[in-house]
Amino acid sequence: VTLVRVLLAASIVAAWGYLVGLTLAVVVRALREGGRRATRPDDEDALSESRFAMPVTVLVRITGDDRGTPGEPARINTAIASVLGLDYPAFDVIVLAEEPRASDWAALKSEWALEPREFFYRQSLPTEPVRMIYKSARDARLMVVDKAPGTPGEAWNCGVNFARSRFVTIVDPRIDFEPDALLHAMATPTRDPGGIVAATSHVETIPSERQRTGGIGVRLLATFQYMASLRSQMESRLLWRNCLGGFGPHDGVVVWRRDALVAAGGFSTAAADPDLEMLGRLQIGATQSDASAPAGGSRAVRTAEVFGRRDALSFGDWVRAAATRQLAALQALPAITSIRGRARRAVAYFVASEIVTPFASAWVVGATTVSALAGWVSWRDAALALLFVSFSRASLDAVALLLREATPHRSSRDGLGRLLLSSPLGIVASGAAACARASGVRTAVAAWRADRRMRLS
Amino acid sequence: MPRASLPAAVPIEMTLLDVLLMSGASAVVVLWAAVSLYVIAVDDRRTRARRILASAIETIEANRDGYQSLADRLDLVRPGLARASRELIMSAVADKDIGGSTREVLAAYLVERWGVRGLERDAEAHRTAREKWRRIAALRILLTLGHPSNMRLLAGAVRDNDDDVASTALALLGDSADPEAVDILLQALRHRQQPASRIALALDRSPQHLADRLRPLLGDADPVVRRWAVTLVGRYPDVDGIEHELAAAADDVDPGVRKAAVQSLGHIGDTVAAAAALRLLGDPVPFVRAAALRAIAALDRDDFADRVAGLLGDHDWWVRLAAKQCLESLGPDIWPVLVRRLDDPDRFVRNGAAEVFQNLGVLDSFIVMEAATADPADRRIALLRSVAAAGELRLTDSLIERAGSALAPRIRSLLSAMGFQHVGAAS
């Protein structure tokens, strides 16, 4: 019992020390960066009009699950119009239609004057069968592929087969974005098109109008998702910016170099997060060829750009997303940890942010509570542990807001005060997220066991 | 359990934990409160600064007509800007969204109040993020002011390792009408101070006529320099002899240069260009062949259609795609060339020819015509059969769906009569 007590206390102290160090390091770095208004480099204006802009194919997947608002014109048409309205000199759009609702299909065909046209393409990656290919008589940049339903990774592979541009990006139709979103997302690959295989941007989670006027629980949950999104942007700005290698944020848009995707064999159809899995694989390929060489030869970059915004998730969807995220991180871990060379720093950041930090936070609270239950510490100590974790998180929220306020689409003054005051309550959401993450861990462990059993047999 | 009921000998590790948790929790609460107050203070300061600036801009713009001289306009804004920080004025002068005449007044105020020496210092180098921002702003301002050192400072910025600083410098040099700006950009290109594509982007924006500066680079020892020189010179179709120089570059040893040359020839060339493009259809490097096909499309040489159609069966997929696009762009008159390819032993060639047939609209016209006829002509039926066979299942399915509900049954029965049993596309 004494040994257990000593080990428990030592582990709590270690986790506490890690969290204190992390919080102070991030706060100091964010304060040094300051709330200075971020300015965009001038070459993005030049790019928007240049004949040297790298062509991009934008992939949009629609399925029968996409929820439109009843009584509104099909949401997908609005989304496609937004994509086609992007201010970028060279891009085309491929919509991957996987049995959308009949009304959406009809609206899509009539709105864009879709005409069936055979198109012989190279089947570089295996996919579900393609039933028909449509080209728009209204906008020559639009192609719609009617295909049998599959997983997201499989649908992206189908899009990659059809893509004719050097770069490919996947845009969720539920994201709202400004016309210059692609221009900003392409700024990094354009600077070094031969060296960059992927560049990630953020999708900011914001409370929808309905969530803003909803009950207190709904409002708080949406606020916490917004704050998590800001923390992720802060990480990109402070930590990932100078990394030779990168793994995208939880919610983001990735611009991929098409030839790298094909060479890597396409997206995984089984991974919980095909983007993360692919980022890991691409960077292993880059570093295994010459471990001593800088990873600059073919690197993934995590940028702090915000591609667009999307509504915060409902509680159920949010819990499911947290579990999937943890599962995806664990699935990708073996591949990611085999990355060598200078991209190792990116691996360290990934492991720290996706695995060590959530675990350390949960451990400080959980282990202190267990100690209190066993009578080894007082309940006051358990409460202090909770207070420590919630306010260290809230401090990070505050500096994330400082950095975010320096960029466009800032919060209103009232909103800022409310966000700062509510940030310590984020621990409640963190608790729910920890439970969801635990379920993700359980699924990953079960999959490993099944895999091991299969290999042994 | 209350602390009082714990055993008398409290383990040392738990005492330490107690202290750590107490101090840690107190520290993070204080930290959170301090950072939150700081965030609110920064926001407050930013709002006040914005208000000061908005008021100054409003004053300048409201009195634009009444006060002609710069000194008059400076007099107007001086009282309002007395509380403004140097960085606020710098950000306003560097802001491209603020009108030129307003920026001029604010720049004059900046120099009058803080002097130009500080701007020079800011533009020289940076270490922190804050200094980097100042450097970028100072570079923009000094260029606006036409400062004598601005080209030297921009040259230094182009060599900087920081992406943002270098990008800003390249963009500013690209927009400049100063001949020295082009010298710096060409120097950067030759010495690979930044990725060549970024420098070329800036050169391509230049308001200056660069043909005479670029021509000597067509023979540079570095293929990257030659490639970009060839690409950039394609902007100047009016320059005598440029087509011949580009045609010579189309025989360069470097495939990248050959590709760039044929692309430029496609934009500006004529007979010599067409001959070079035709020659490059047989280039050993696929991307050069694809570029040659696009050049032929740009030159609109439908007399080359047969040679182009031959590349429908190229071993490289991108060349095949370029051949299809090229044939489509040459227009419907080339259809007899396609007919010869419909029975080609190579499946890719047959597929490609059928696809081009479809996209030219020739297939739709034929089939509609034949479906409307009671007694279709044998020759046309044979042709349609060839196209349908070459295009395979989805081509006929899409043809039926495209025909619409009125014509679809007749086309379906026509295709059935020709031996195509699966014609089950949605009608």
Image (cartoon, rainbow, N blue to C red):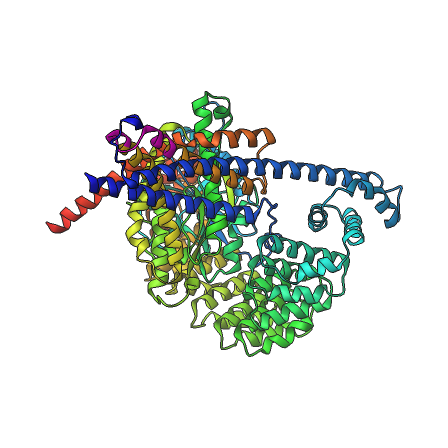
Residue B311 sits in quarter = bottom left
B336 or A260: nearer the viewer: A260
Could you tell me residue A283's position as x and y percent? 37, 57
Residue furthest front as drawn: B8
Q: Quadrant of the C terminus of chain B?
A: top left
Count the numbered circles shown.
0
Residue A411 sits in quarter = top right
Could you tell me residue A80's position as x and y percent? 49, 39
Q: Is residue B351 above or below residue B374?
A: below
Residue located at (18% from left, 47% from top):
A451
Q: Main secondary structure of the magenta part?
A: helix
- Side (left or right) of A222 relative to B229: left
Q: Quadrant of the N terminus of chain B?
A: top left
Queried whether the magenta region covers residue B254, the answer comes back as: no
Q: Which residues are magenta?
A: A372-385
Residue located at (37% from left, 60% from top):
B349
Could you tell me residue A238's position as x and y percent? 49, 50
A328 or A344: nearer the viewer: A344
- Can residue A112 be seen here? no
B132 or A17: nearer the viewer: A17
Q: Is residue B195 above or below residue A314?
A: below
Residue furthest top as drawn: A215
Queried whether the magenta region covers residue A373, the answer comes back as: yes
- Can residue A191 be seen here? yes
Could you tell me residue A17's position as x and y percent? 38, 45
